[in-house]
Amino acid sequence: MATNSGAISAIPVEIFAAYIVEKLRKTNPHLQFATDESGNVLDGSVVHIPQAGNSPSVVKNRKNFPATAVQRGDGFVTYPLDVYSTDPTHVTWHEEHEISYNKTDSVLNDHIATLIEAIGDNILFAWVRGLKPSAGSFVADSIPAASIIRTSGGTADVNPEDGQTGQRLAFSYRDLQKAQAMMNKGGVPKEERYAMIESYQYQQFLDSLSTNQMAAFQNSADLANGIVGRFAGFQILERSSVLAFTTAGVLRVPGEALAATDNLGSLCWQKSSVAKAQGDIKPFQTVDDPTYYGDIFSALVKFGGRCRRADWKGLIAIVQDVVPDTEA
């Protein structure tokens, strides 16, 4: 974005914003598989999603008149946009003019990559642990236990790099089939269903497939859009981290260190059941700052999302289960 010749010119906001949006799409393919409500952001900071009330009752061979008219009690699901901002980076004058590579470009790309990774992780978290208005503020509104499936495969060692210890039940293709059945039973549209599977669980899923299932899965891939295959009506994506829960079922915040007994999770959703909304995108810079003897750079992005349905239908978490005690 910058050059090594002379003073650094201002970064055009429009070019910066377009670059971030493109990187968001490529690095976080799950964001393109959610309902985009960026056009419904109020005052640059909050989104309201209308929720239809109960449908009218049906009476067969009505005999009593007049029928009672009942108002439909519509409501709203609301979520705020989070503000993601990077800590400023200082590039000295001699670094910009004397080193062999363009450090300004490197710094800006570092800010963008950090923002994009944080947004991608936090949107998955926001879909599962949303916020709802209460007494003029917002309180947590998490996915219910009824929307959580426990893994059912064989006993498998955890990945020690995640901070866990011991063993858990592995992720099986049958867990995706159960998620499919739950969505079918709940009347969730069968089109545009997706599953983001954590990398370690994804390998367990592959190991659970038969030879014929594996061949069909690999042939259904659409790698250009981040889809590694299709199974049980879900288009599958894979990510190094998706969700994590404590043994009490509390969601871990993205980036938070896991306890030895925590359980990893993956996420299934239908596109119309989850939302994303993008707000302001802005780079900040001070060029030739006399107190820093160089340039200062930082960046800010407003982004938010949540489950669009108050009943949480169309969103299912698949979470590691503990190995049953055979002596019990």
Image (cartoon, rainbow, N blue to C red):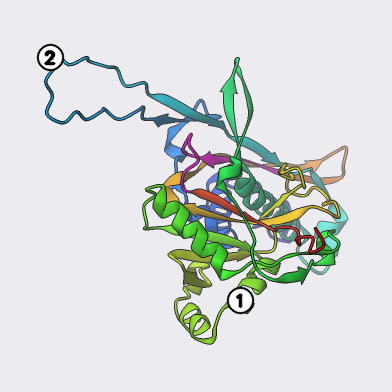
**Is residue 25 in sight in this rendering?**
no
Q: Does residue 109 appear to the left or right of 69 in the view shown?
A: right
**Element marked by disc 1:** helix
Residue under the image location 53 percent in, 60 percent down: 195
Residue 156 colored magenta? no
Residue 303 colored magenta? yes
Camera-side mark, 2 or 1: 2
Circle 2 sits on which residue?
Answer: 65
Q: Is residue 285 above or below residue 216?
A: above
Image quadrant in which the N terminus is located? bottom right
Q: Is residue 188 above or below residue 160?
A: above
Estimate the spatial distance between the alpha carbons at disc 2 and disc 1, rounded to whole Å: 60 Å
Tell me the amino acid under the disc marked 2: Phe
On the image, which quarter does residue 154 sit in?
Answer: bottom right
Q: Position of residue 280 (x, y in %)?
A: 56, 38
Q: Earlier in the sequence, mark 2 or mark 1?
A: 2
Q: Position of residue 251 (x, y in %)?
A: 71, 44
Magenta part of the chain = 299-314
Circle 1 sits on which residue?
Answer: 208
Q: Does residue 143 appear to the left or right of 222 in the view shown?
A: right
Q: Nearer the viewer, residue 55 or 161?
A: 55
Q: Position of residue 227 (x, y in %)?
A: 51, 69
Image quadrant in which the C terminus is located? bottom right
On the image, which quarter does residue 170 sit in?
Answer: bottom right
**Element marked by disc 2:** loop
Q: Nearer the viewer, residue 287 or 224?
A: 224
